[in-house]
Image (tube, rainbow, N blue to C red):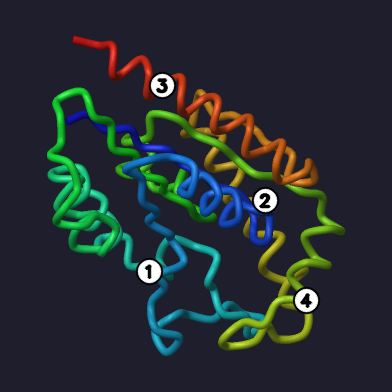
Amino acid sequence: MKTLVVGVGGMTNGGKTTLSMSLHQQIPNSCIIAQDSYFKDDSVVPMDSHGFKQYDMLDALHMDTMMNDVDSWRRDPEAFLRQCGLLSEQTTPVEDEDVFVLIVEGFLIFNHRPLNDLFDIRYLMEIPYEICKKRRSSRVYRPPDPPGYFDGHVWPMYLKNRREMENMVSEIVILDGLRPKEELLAVVCKDVYQEIKRLMEKN
C-alpha cells in the first residue's frame, strides 16, 4: 500500500472545495479532509479591536484534531476509509502497489508547518479581490458576516496569511480560479495520475 497527500489551498470562495470534491470523485481510493470542519466554537474565537471575530487564523481552528485525523489516515488509509464509510467490507483486498490518496483542502493548510510538510503535491486557488468579495457576499455563514467584515478582516488576513505561506512553502502550483472547472480538474487529475503511476511503478 502506498500513499499520496494532495493539498488544495487558497482564499475563501476561491473554488478549492469544488475542485477537491471533483478530484475525489475521479480518483480511486481517495478521501477528503476539509479544514473548515475543524473551526472552534464561536464563543472561544477572539475579537480584534474593531469587533471582528478572528476566524481567519490558525488559532481559530482545532489543528491538533485535524492533524490526528491526517495521521490516522497515514497510518492505515484502508481502515480510515472503512471508518468513514467510503470502503465496503467486500472491497478487493489491498495490494502492495495500490495507492491511496488523501486530499486536504482549506484556507490555511500551507500555513501550518507540520501539515504542510506532509504534502506531496500542493495547489493554491486564486481569484481577484472583486470576485472573491462578490462570492463571499452571496454565501450564508453561521454566524453571518457583520458589515465590513470582508474588507476589515477577511481580505487583510488573506494577504497576511499568503505572505507567511510564501516564506514557508516551495513547489506550489498556482491555479486561476476563474478558469472553467473542467479545465482545472483536468490539470490536477493529470498531475495526480502521473504521481500515482510513478508510485505504482516504484519498487
The residue wearing badge 3 is 195
Separation of residues labelled 2 and 3 (CA atoms): 31 Å
Image x and y of residue 84, in percent: 25, 63
Q: For the residues labelled 4 and 1, say whether their Cβ atoms are less than 8 Å apart.
A: no
In the figure, residue 67 lies in which quadrant? bottom left
Q: Nearer the viewer, mark 4 or mark 2?
A: 4
Image x and y of residue 87, in percent: 24, 55
Q: Amino acid at mark 1?
A: Tyr
Q: Earlier in the sequence, mark 4 or mark 2?
A: 4
Q: Nearer the viewer, mark 4 or mark 1?
A: 4
The residue wearing badge 1 is 38
Q: Quadrant of the N terminus?
A: top left
In the figure, residue 114 lies in which quadrant? top left
Q: Earlier in the sequence, mark 3 or mark 4?
A: 4
Q: Secondary structure at mark 1?
A: helix
Q: Amino acid at mark 3?
A: Glu
The residue wearing badge 4 is 138
Q: Nearer the viewer, mark 1 or mark 2?
A: 1
Q: Nearer the viewer, mark 2 or mark 3?
A: 3
The residue wearing badge 2 is 159
Separation of residues labelled 3 and 4 (CA atoms): 37 Å
Looking at this view, is 170 or 30 the one in front? Answer: 30
Separation of residues labelled 4 and 2 (CA atoms): 21 Å
Q: Secondary structure at mark 4?
A: helix
Q: Earlier in the sequence, mark 2 or mark 3?
A: 2
